[in-house]
Every structure is written in structure tokens, then in C-alpha cells.
Image (spheres, rainbow, N blue to C red):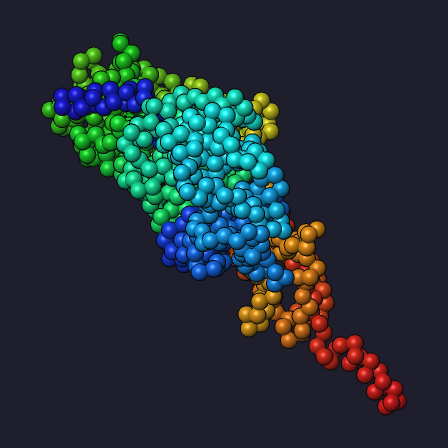
């Protein structure tokens, strides 16, 4: 009764959360990759991030300059006085600009491919006293604007001009923004101001934001901005000045502001949602909001980030592209695959034990594990977590939705390995069936359960060493004992019913058993002789009134005429699944979701869309980021597919589109020769019309070296600008002039070529990401001189000497 009352209270809280806000993290958490300070070898704290045109990441560190990351290795680019790097930006040419405490400038490559910081202070037209942090950098109308709270430094490509932003600080300028090609400054005492020509004026209705700190301003459409401030989330019409709160602002964000939670940054994500970063708060690190202000995801230290103080958020990429979200933190850096259709729940969400099943009962998500039964709940803020049902503390192996034949009300039956069978009724009351004295004579180790078609009051129970029955009489359960105890002695893992009283049962390691119930019950065992590819790893499913068998050799049906299992087509598919093992199949929307395997030990998920022709329409790429481990369960939940892998529960949101074919770049990051002599250090150059140098993806002729013959061994270090599941990135390369074919795909990013003969060579590399998409090809050319005794001068000498001797 206590549990019942507690559940009712929790359900009321859930309903309240639904009214007040969205259900946060409802489908799980995104995949997060954390970088600790020891990994990037710099200060704990980081302030900003940007990605250049090549795809290389740059992070502003607190006291070790600019960090450069290429997916494999970290490098440090020093700045004067090891000052804190507070802002980074990239312009249309690909140049990265840097703002520090007391300095500003840009990153520039040289002919060797080294990248160094170059200050612009010497370009100042006007003298200026010492200044502190440069908080923001923007490219605006052909200029680069460096924002300091008292000054605006305007770089036109030649000189730097200073615009005074009121040194008496009466405006209390906070941050600057560029939205729809208009430049704004948020000022606590001045409201929202705009740079028009060379004058800073109050923006239309900008006084609305008087005595408000604006932490983010981003485009909503071509004339409306979204503003993140300490007073709320607003929609701002840049033309009329009309301001309105986002529809759901008061329900969540507004409550955070009432609690004096400190916002630090607001930025747009590349699916048009909004990201807000917080600092110095024990619960909030980063929150993703939809366009009406409903929270979708909350990330913090408790559920995956390294730290709760998130100082910035950055995401590059066009809509729908698989570009990670980068979160610089007070301690470390987090890379978040926030727009992947794949999310997951694990221990940080309260879920424990290897998962054996998933279902939704009376609107609530239940997960069955080796530690018991868990259900999804939402705390007072609407954040999803899992709570264990205390009455069931045994490994929960099987479950069954039992529909009362008379009332059609459902009961959820749960089979455990040590405590028998439990039921949860429509009012979420939990009861042990096996505690009934009538069941004492039988120990229900319930590996599988099935509601009879012939007698819907009856439930069959597959156990270890026996097969039992129990029956519902409309009030309670009655024990019907073991069925054919002398014959049914295997471990029964899955039950299907082809027609009333015709049971097909998959065993753990003894093939398939058929039980034809009747006055003279017939029991038949099937194995290798009848076409099963293995006695182990078999299961059964029912689809459209037919029974299918899932095996290590694919999907089978039983052919009565020849007494043999044969490969079969699932209803709606125009082809047989016979080239791979299949352990799970579940109808999912207008398709089938399959858990597949092969003899090489590969495990994967794929979706077969139902098509009329024999042409296969298979979706597999979204699932490639899931670990290569056995799938323990699949559950179709509307547009969501739940995938149980060991102790982790993954969700696939079929409504999320991702462009898996988005191109990326192979990067040649270093070229060395004997004695680790560096020929190239990672940055190709191009020379702009004004004579300045920026990075690019093609080797400049000035960067093509000619090596002496004694240095005829060359090592390349390569990487990829694709940052998701980098440990599964593959490389293929060729050295033209030495090889005629590309290498096989390999995980080795450091190919070595030794004892090269004289001649011209071009090294080419391409990468392949976790989704199977190949990169653009990167190239590096060089030549090797002949040894002195094969040089042109030596040959002339040989000819002359030969003439003299003759």
C-alpha cells in the first residue's frame, strides 16, 4: 500500500512536470567524450572554442594559450605572457582570431606548417592604456571587431582603430553579438545598443533590457533574434523592437533565474535549438531548449560532464550534420554528440544491472535488469531518471503483458530468477504471485512467459529444466504445475504459438522444441538435422499470425511438408535474411528492427524498411556508434526504438535526421624524416591578395621539399576532421611514385616509407569515419635527390672518365 501511495504521488509529480515543462532527458543522454587536463596538457579552465575551415578545433585555455586539436593529438600555441584566452573567432578566409587578457591578434601559419600567434597591438592607430579581457570577436562588414567592455577595437586588415565604449563604465557593457548582419552590445545601464555606421545607439526598444545582463543573442529568422538574459528568454524583432517572452520561459528558465542561477553563455545549436551554459551551480551545467523555451536536455557533472561550470558552447555545421557540441569547462572540455538520434541511459540515470527487457506499461517505461525492475520517473524539475521497485530485488529475466480475457485490463507479469513471478496491475500495485502457498511446490525460475491463445486465462512459463502453467480465474492466479515433467527438461527461453495449442519453444542450447497440446500431447525436438544452423542462440517471434525462428543463420520458418527449417521472408519484405545471424526482430513503424551478428564476432543493429520489391532498404548507419556487443533486447515505442546492450539502454529517435554523407577532411598533420627532422608541421598555406598567409587544405608550392638522399625515409602523421567515435576512424593511403594501389583500410595513422629512390612522390590519404563516409583526399608532394654517385654531375664525370680511359 505504501508503494501504491508513493507511486500515485510520483505520477502526480510527473503530470505536474508535463504541465510546467518538457520532460528533460526523456530519451537518455547524448554520447559524451570528456578531455581531462592531463590529456591536453594545459590548465584546467577553458573559455572558448572555434573550428577553422579545415575542421581543426581551437580551444581558449586559461594560461597555456590556444589549444589545437585534430581528433588525435593536442598542441599548444603560446600567447604573450601566457594570458588567458577569452575569445576565438574564424573569419570568411579561415583565419582564426584570438582575444586574450591584454592582447588580441590572430593565428598564422608559416612555410613549415607551424602555426603561431601574431599580435595586432602594433597596428593600433591610437595609443591606449592597459586593457583587460577581450570577450568577443566578430567579423562585421569587412572588419574584425574585438570587444572589450570599455573599448571596441576595429581591425580593417591594415590598422586597428579604437572606439571608446564609455570608460566611466556607466553603461556596464557585458557582451557583443552579431545577428542578421547587425552589431549589438548588451549594456546593463544602457539596455541593448547597436552599432550604426560609426555610432553606438539604442537599438529599437533597446531600453527594455535596461538593468538586464544579456548573455546570448542569436538569430531566430532573418529579422528576429532570440535573447538570453537574466530576466528570461525573449524573442526580439530587430526592426520594430517588439519583445515577447518565449512561451515556456516562466515554467523552467524563469524559475532558474528566480533561484539566482548564474548564466554565462547563450548560443544557437545547428538544429535551431538554443543552448544555455551555467557556472557555479551544483545542478545545472548546460541546458538545451527548443524554440518555445521548453528544456530538452540538461547536462551536468552528475550525468556525464567533467564539471558543472560551462563557460561556452560551440557547434559548427549545417543543419542536420553530425557536428559535435563543444563545451569548454572550468575543469576540462566535453565533446557532446547532442544531435545524434542515439541517446543512452546508464548508471548515472539510476539504472543498474544487465538489461533483459524493456516495455511501456500504462504509459510508464519499465526496464528489467539483473538487479531488479526499474521504471522511468521525473523529478520536480521534469528530469528523467529510473527508480527501482523495491519489492522486486531479484534478477528480472522475462515479462508479459497479460490481458484479462473478461475485462481486457492489462497486468504486467515479471518473471525473476530467484523469487518467482510478480505482477503489477493497472493501478501500479505490486504483488508476488509465487508467494501464494499454492505455488510453494514449484520454484518459478521464469526465463519466458506466454499467454495461451487456446485458453487466454492460461500462462505458460519456460523455466530451467521444466515447463509450467498457471491460470487466472478472474480474481487470483492458480498453479497448474509442470507440463510433461518427464519430457520437458530443457531451459526454455522463448515461446511462440503458431495456432492454438501449437507451441514452438526456443531452448538455451538444445535447439527448438515443439509442443502440440491435446488429449495426446506431442513433443518434438528439432536440431541440426532439421536445418537449424546451431543448437544455441535461437529465438522465436510471431508476426502476422506466423512463427519465425531467429538463428545464427538468419530468419527461418518451419516447412511442414519436408519437416525442415528454411530461410523465409518477413511479411512485407521482398527478400530473405540469410546472410547474417539474427538474434532479435521487432516490427518498428513500417519496418523491422533487427539485432544482427556474424561468425567474426561483429554485433550490430539495422532497420529493414518494408518495400514491395526485392530491393533492400536498410538503415544501419545511426547504430554504428553503439558498442559492438550482443543486443539483449529491442523494444518499439512509437517513433523510438529502445536497444538494450549489457547495462546500457540506448534509444533511437527515428524523427531525428542526420546527414551521414556530410564530407569531411583528411588532414596531414606532420611529416618527418630521419632523426625526427620535421619537414611539415600540419598547416598548408595560401597567400591572399594582400600578401597575408592563412591555412588551407592544399599544399603550396613553397611547401614542397627536396630531400637529400640520406633523408630518403619519411613518416606521415594523419588525422580526420570528423570527431565522432574517432577511435573507429580508418585510413587508406598511397605514395604515388612508389605504390600503384591504395592501402587497405587500417587504424594506423602513421605510415612510414623507407629507402625511397630518387624521384618525385605524392603522398595521398583518405579517411573513413564510423558511418562509412570517406573524406576528401589530402596530398603532400616531395622529391628525393639521387645519391651523389647517381647525380647528373657524377654521370657527366663518369662519361668524361670513360672517354679518357678509352
User: In terms of depth relative to the viewer, which is nearer, 583 or 783?
Assistant: 783
| Quarter occupied by residue 409 | top left
| Residue found at the far left of this picture | 437
| Quarter occupied by residue 574 | top right
> On the picture, is 120 further left or further right than 251?
right
| Residue found at the far bottom of this picture | 805
| Quarter occupied by residue 629 | top left
> On the picture, is 725 further left or further right than 467?
right
User: In terms of depth relative to the viewer, which is nearer, 502 or 243?
Assistant: 243
User: In terms of depth relative to the viewer, which is nearer, 734 or 33?
Assistant: 33
| Residue found at the far front of this picture | 168
Q: Quadrant of the N terminus?
A: top left
Residue shown at 32% from the left, 15% from the top: 454
Q: Where's residue 537, x and y in %?
A: 38, 38
Q: Where's residue 462, x and y in %?
A: 28, 29
Q: Is residue 39 above or below residue 301?
A: below
Q: Where's residue 234, x and y in %?
A: 43, 26
Residue shown at 43% from the left, 39% from the top: 173
> On the picture, is 456 further left or further right than 736?
left
Decide if residue 340 is in sight here: no
Residue shown at 40% from the left, 20% from the top: 247
Q: Where's residue 16, x and y in %?
A: 28, 20
Q: Is residue 414 above or below residue 406?
A: below
> On the picture, is 376 further left or further right than 724?
left
Decide if residue 677 is in sight here: yes
Residue shown at 59% from the left, 57% from the top: 109
Total tally of numbered discs in the picture: 0
Q: Quadrant of the C terminus?
A: bottom right
Amino acid at each position: 500500500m505504501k508503494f501504491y501511495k508513493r507511486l500515485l504521488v510520483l505520477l502526480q509529480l510527473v503530470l505536474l512536470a508535463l504541465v510546467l515543462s518538457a520532460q528533460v532527458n526523456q530519451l537518455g543522454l547524448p554520447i559524451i567524450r570528456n578531455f581531462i587536463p592531463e590529456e591536453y596538457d594545459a590548465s584546467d579552465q577553458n573559455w572558448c572554442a572555434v573550428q577553422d575551415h579545415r575542421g581543426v578545433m581551437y580551444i581558449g585555455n586559461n594560461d597555456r594559450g590556444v589549444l589545437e586539436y585534430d581528433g588525435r593529438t593536442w598542441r599548444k600555441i603560446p600567447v604573450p605572457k601566457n594570458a588567458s584566452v577569452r575569445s576565438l573567432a574564424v573569419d570568411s578566409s579561415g583565419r582564426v582570431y584570438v582575444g586574450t587578457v591584454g592582447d588580441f591578434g590572430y593565428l598564422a601559419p608559416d612555410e613549415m606548417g607551424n602555426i603561431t600567434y601574431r599580435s595586432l597591438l602594433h597596428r593600433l592607430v591610437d595609443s591606449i592604456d592597459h586593457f583587460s579581457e577581450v570577450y568577443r570577436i566578430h567579423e562585421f562588414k569587412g572588419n574584425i571587431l574585438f570587444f572589450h567592455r570599455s573599448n571596441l577595437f576595429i581591425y580593417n586588415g591594415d590598422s586597428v582603430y579604437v572606439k571608446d565604449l564609455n570608460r566611466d563604465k556607466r553603461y556596464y557593457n557585458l557582451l557583443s553579438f552579431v545577428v542578421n548582419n547587425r552589431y549589438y552590445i548588451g549594456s546593463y545601464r544602457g539596455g541593448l545598443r547597436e552599432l550604426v555606421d560609426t555610432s553606438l545607439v539604442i537599438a529599437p526598444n533597446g531600453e527594455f533590457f535596461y538593468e538586464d545582463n544579456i548573455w546570448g543573442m542569436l538569430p531566430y529568422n532573418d529579422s528576429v533574434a532570440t535573447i538570453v538574459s537574466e530576466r528570461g528568454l525573449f524573442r526580439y524583432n530587430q526592426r520594430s523592437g517588439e519583445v515577447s517572452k518565449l512561451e515556456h520561459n516562466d515554467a523552467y528558465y524563469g524559475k532558474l533565474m528566480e533561484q539566482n542561477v548564474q548564466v554565462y553563455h547563450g548560443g544557437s545549436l545547428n538544429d535551431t535549438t538554443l543552448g544555455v551554459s551555467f557556472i557555479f551551480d551544483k545542478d545545472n551545467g548546460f541546458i538545451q531548449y527548443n524554440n518555445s523555451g521548453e528544456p530538452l536536455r540538461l547536462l551536468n557533472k552528475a550525468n556525464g560532464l567533467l564539471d558543472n561550470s560551462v563557460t561556452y558552447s560551440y557547434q559548427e555545421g549545417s543543419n542536420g550534420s553530425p557536428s559535435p557540441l563543444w563545451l569548454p569547462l572550468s575543469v576540462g572540455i566535453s565533446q557532446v554528440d547532442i544531435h545524434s538520434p542515439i541517446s543512452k541511459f546508464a548508471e548515472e540515470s539510476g539504472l543498474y544491472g544487465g538489461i533483459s527487457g524493456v516495455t511501456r506499461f500504462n504509459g510508464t517505461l519499465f526496464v528489467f535488469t539483473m538487479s531488479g525492475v526499474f521504471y522511468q520517473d521525473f523529478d520536480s524539475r521534469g528530469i528523467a531518471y529510473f527508480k527501482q521497485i523495491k519489492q522486486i530485488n531479484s534478477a528480472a529475466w522475462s515479462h508479459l503483458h497479460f490481458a484479462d480475457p473478461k475485462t481486457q485490463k492489462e497486468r504486467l507479469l515479471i518473471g525473476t530468477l530467484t523469487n518467482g513471478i510478480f505482477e503489477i496491475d493497472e493501478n501500479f500495485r505490486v504483488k508476488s504471485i509465487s508467494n501464494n502457498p499454492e505455488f510453494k511446490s514449484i520454484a518459478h525460475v521464469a526465463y519466458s512467459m506466454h499467454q495461451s491463445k487456446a485458453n487466454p486465462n492460461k500462462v505458460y512459463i519456460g523455466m530451467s529444466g521444466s515447463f509450467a502453467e498457471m491460470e487466472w480465474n478472474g480474481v487470483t492466479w492458480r498453479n497448474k504445475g509442470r507440463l510433461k515433467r518427464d519430457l520437458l527438461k530443457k531451459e526454455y527461453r522463448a515461446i511462440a504459438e503458431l495456432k492454438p495449442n501449437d507451441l514452438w519453444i526456443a531452448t538455451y542450447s538444445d535447439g527448438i522444441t515443439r509442443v502440440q497440446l491435446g488429449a495426446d500431447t506431442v513433443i518434438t525436438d528439432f536440431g541440426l538435422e532439421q536445418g537449424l544452423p546451431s543448437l544455441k542462440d535461437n529465438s522465436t517471434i510471431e508476426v502476422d499470425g506466423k512463427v519465425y525462428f531467429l538463428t545464427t543463420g538468419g530468419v527461418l520458418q518451419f516447412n511442414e511438408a519436408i519437416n525442415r527449417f528454411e530461410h523465409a521472408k518477413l511479411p512485407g519484405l521482398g527478400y530473405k535474411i540469410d546472410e547474417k545471424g539474427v538474434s532479435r526482430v521487432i516490427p518498428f513503424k513500417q519496418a523491422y528492427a533487427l539485432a544482427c551478428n556474424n561468425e567474426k564476432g561483429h554485433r550490430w543493429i539495422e532497420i529493414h524498411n518494408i518495400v514491395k520489391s526485392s530491393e533492400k532498404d536498410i538503415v544501419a548507419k545511426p547504430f554504428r556508434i553503439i558498442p559492438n556487443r550482443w543486443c539483449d533486447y529491442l523494444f518499439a515505442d512509437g517513433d523510438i526504438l529502445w536497444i538494450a546492450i549489457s547495462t546500457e539502454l540506448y534509444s533511437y529517435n527515428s524523427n531525428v535526421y542526420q546527414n551521414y554523407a556530410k564530407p569531411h577532411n583528411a588532414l596531414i598533420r606532420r611529416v618527418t624524416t630521419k632523426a625526427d627532422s620535421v619537414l611539415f608541421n600540419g598547416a598548408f598555406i595560401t597567400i591572399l591578395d594582400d600578401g597575408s598567409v592563412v591555412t588551407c587544405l592544399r599544399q603550396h608550392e613553397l611547401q614542397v621539399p627536396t630531400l637529400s638522399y640520406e633523408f630518403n625515409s619519411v613518416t606521415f602523421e594523419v588525422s580526420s576532421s570528423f570527431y565522432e567515435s574517432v577511435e573507429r576512424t580508418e585510413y587508406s593511403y598511397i605514395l604515388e611514385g612508389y605504390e600503384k594501389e591504395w592501402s587497405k583500410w587500417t587504424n594506423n595513422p602513421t605510415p612510414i616509407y623507407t629507402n625511397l629512390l630518387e624521384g618525385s612522390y605524392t603522398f595521398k590519404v583518405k579517411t573513413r569515419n564510423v558511418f562509412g563516409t570517406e573524406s576528401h583526399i589530402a596530398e603532400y608532394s616531395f622529391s628525393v635527390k639521387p645519391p651523389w654517385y647517381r647525380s647528373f654531375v657524377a654521370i657527366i664525370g663518369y662519361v668524361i672518365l670513360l672517354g679518357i680511359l678509352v
